[in-house]
Image (cartoon, helix red, strand yellow):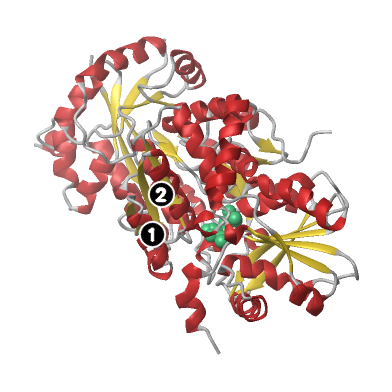
Amino acid sequence: MKSLVETDELGFYGKFGGAYIPELLYPAVEELRKAYLKYKDDTSFEDEFKALLKDYVGRPTPLYYSEKLSEKYGGKIYLKREDLCHTGAHKINNTIGQILLAKRLNKTQIVAETGAGQHGVATATVCALLGMECIIYMGEKDMERQAPNVQRIKYLGAKVIPAVSGSKTLKDATNEAIRHWINNPDTFYLIGSVVGPHPYPSMVAYFQSVISEEIIRQLQEKEGVNHPDKVIACVGGGSNAAGAFYHFYDVPEVDLIAVEAGGLGVKSGKSAATAQLGKPGVIHGSYTLLMQDEFGQITEPHSISAGLDYPGIGPLHAETIHSGRVDCIAINDDKALDHASFLAKSEGIIPALESSHALAVLDHLKIKKDEIIVINLSGRGDKDMSTLTQNME
Amino acid sequence: MKKEISIFTTAGYPEIDSLNRQLDLLEEFEIDFCEVGIPFSDPMADGPTIQETSMKAISNGMNIDLLFKQLSERQSNTPIYLMGYLNPIEQYGIERFLKKCVDNQIIGLILPDVSIEIYERNYRRLFEEYGISLCFLVTPRTSDDRIKRAAELSKNGFLYLVSTNQITGGTSKSQNSLDDRYLEVKKLAGSTKVMIGFGIHDRKSFEQKTAHVDGGIIGSAFLRAVQNNETESFLRGITNKTEKISTLASS
Ligand SMILES: Cc1ncc(COP(=O)(O)O)c(C=O)c1O
């Protein structure tokens, strides 16, 4: 049987996916698709990728047993510490993979979008490492709420261009990055999540799959089991979730729980709960679930967390949520804030606001004794300090 | 040979009911055909001008139902193609949309985010059933084989040659180096009409870019003229006509 992470030749996971791109992008997307197929199973590529993940990113990241969370909620709760990656989030796993592809394609200029700024930082970082020119599009609103990351991107030598259209957040930054790519077809577009036209969703999921690969090994060591009972991850576009779920999609005993941003409440009109509010349609080159009005105009999402403030969701998630393989739960702004605070005070770990949404799902689960639960702690909260301190009781 | 002139406009811009007045004017100027843009919130291949006109049109309340209503009331005989992104049409329902196109004598569609591959798999059967042609875009970088395939699929409409690899609204001078490629595209297209677009902004750039093909499409430059209340003088310039036809006739 076909694995859930495989697509057909046009890039569809079942109903969702594909490449809905203007002909202007066809040569660039086709070049990328061929390069990805060629290098994915190339041992020298694999060796270089793995070496950088180890020595530069600091992998494997720890799988940390949280005594406090386990005590409070029952079961055995582990945190997969992607917050300890170099630059502070899982995003760098993917940027290392893509920059090595860009190098093999002899590219010299990189363009990317960013929401929370973590992907922007991770992209600027690998561009500095490999000596490439780097341009980052970021929504004007996000530049304000994630100011420390803007400074980091600039300090690393990249150029930040504000996206001023629409809601001035991740969706608009993505539009601008795609337009830049159309105008500069020799530039490499280094996308930050499992979104966009095929092959991006598959490729980014693959580069992030190191997360679940490590979880398997670490649980064998710590618990003597081959898989956890539940894996929980937040979903903006869905790259950290795709990475944390990757090797478990085809293991039906593992519950996979995707957490999206409820904003002020799923029904409040100020939400980014794409799986619940979205309908099938086309955004940024793929057929997926997206938030839109009755006329098919894409609507503006809301989340306190810039990385989840996106009206779409990767097609792999659309397919697996739609089919029921993955459960999806929305967590509102206030609950995410509560859980950020709890983890900081109880474990001494300040999580990113995105990751705090994943933590908050614990309130909604019936947890059996001895159940092994892994929460993907996708990033650290340094970038969110102004939002976190403003909301301190 | 006389080159065909086509004008692109955004439905619902600048006013919700501007379309039919614009179509009348285009007929008076003997514009060969018109592309009516269905506004979309996130037009990925478009520059600032069409982004702005689209946002304005959406906030004016333009939508597909209203567009067809306006089209059904038109007096103008200028042939019409509809251009837009897939999502609003998907929500409307492809088959329902194609029916309405037939009812309103629409010749064909231009959907920049629908690739040849996706068209052949998902839409071709329906389009052929309704006799609506989808006109494909190609660029100077598109491979020869792909140009032939796109031209074959577009044969009842036209092949849309994007002049440079640029989003809409640029005013870049046509590089002479591309002229040879335009000529090759025209040859590869066989009997399919080739219209060039993106970046044509006045009579001079029109003449330059259409030298080797059948005609040219003017979009952003027309909309900028509309924005500046210079629609008629712009059309006079582009068509090389000193007066509107109606004025000529009556004088
Ligand atoms: C820490 C962190 N987690 C999660 C996300 C959401 O992205 P994705 O769903 O692709 O993992 C972001 C995005 O910026 C992030 O910075």
Element class at badge 2: helix
Q: Using residue B83 as the reference point, say whether residue B207 is left or right of it.
A: left
Q: Residues within 10 Å of mark 1 (few under 14, many from 20)?
A: some
Give the image quadrant in which the ligand numbered 1 is located.
bottom right
Same subunit: marks 1 and 2: yes
Indicate whether B176 appears above or below A377. Answer: above
Q: Residues within 10 Å of mark 2 (few under 14, many from 20)?
A: many
Report the amino acid beneath label 2. Ala
Where is residue B23 drawn, in percent x and y?
32, 42
* Residue B146 can be seen in this image: yes
Compare residues A51 and A301 and report the one nearer the observer. Answer: A51
Residue A10: name its quadrant: top right
State which quarter of the image contains the C terminus of chain A.
bottom right
Task: Report which residue position mark 1 lands on.
Answer: A152
Report the amino acid beneath label 1. Arg
Where is residue A33 drawn, in percent x and y?
55, 29
The disc at residue A378 is none
Subunit that carries the residue with mark 1:
A
Residue occupying image coordinates x 54% and y 55%: A295
Compare residues A360 and A347 and report the one nearer the observer. Answer: A347
Q: Residue furthest bottom?
A: A393
Where is residue B211 drawn, in percent x and y?
22, 17
Q: Residue furthest front?
A: A55
Task: Report which residue position mark 2 lands on.
Answer: A124
Residue occupying image coordinates x 13% and y 39%: B247
Residue occupying image coordinates x 55% and y 41%: A52
Compare residues A378 and B38 and report the one nearer the observer. Answer: A378
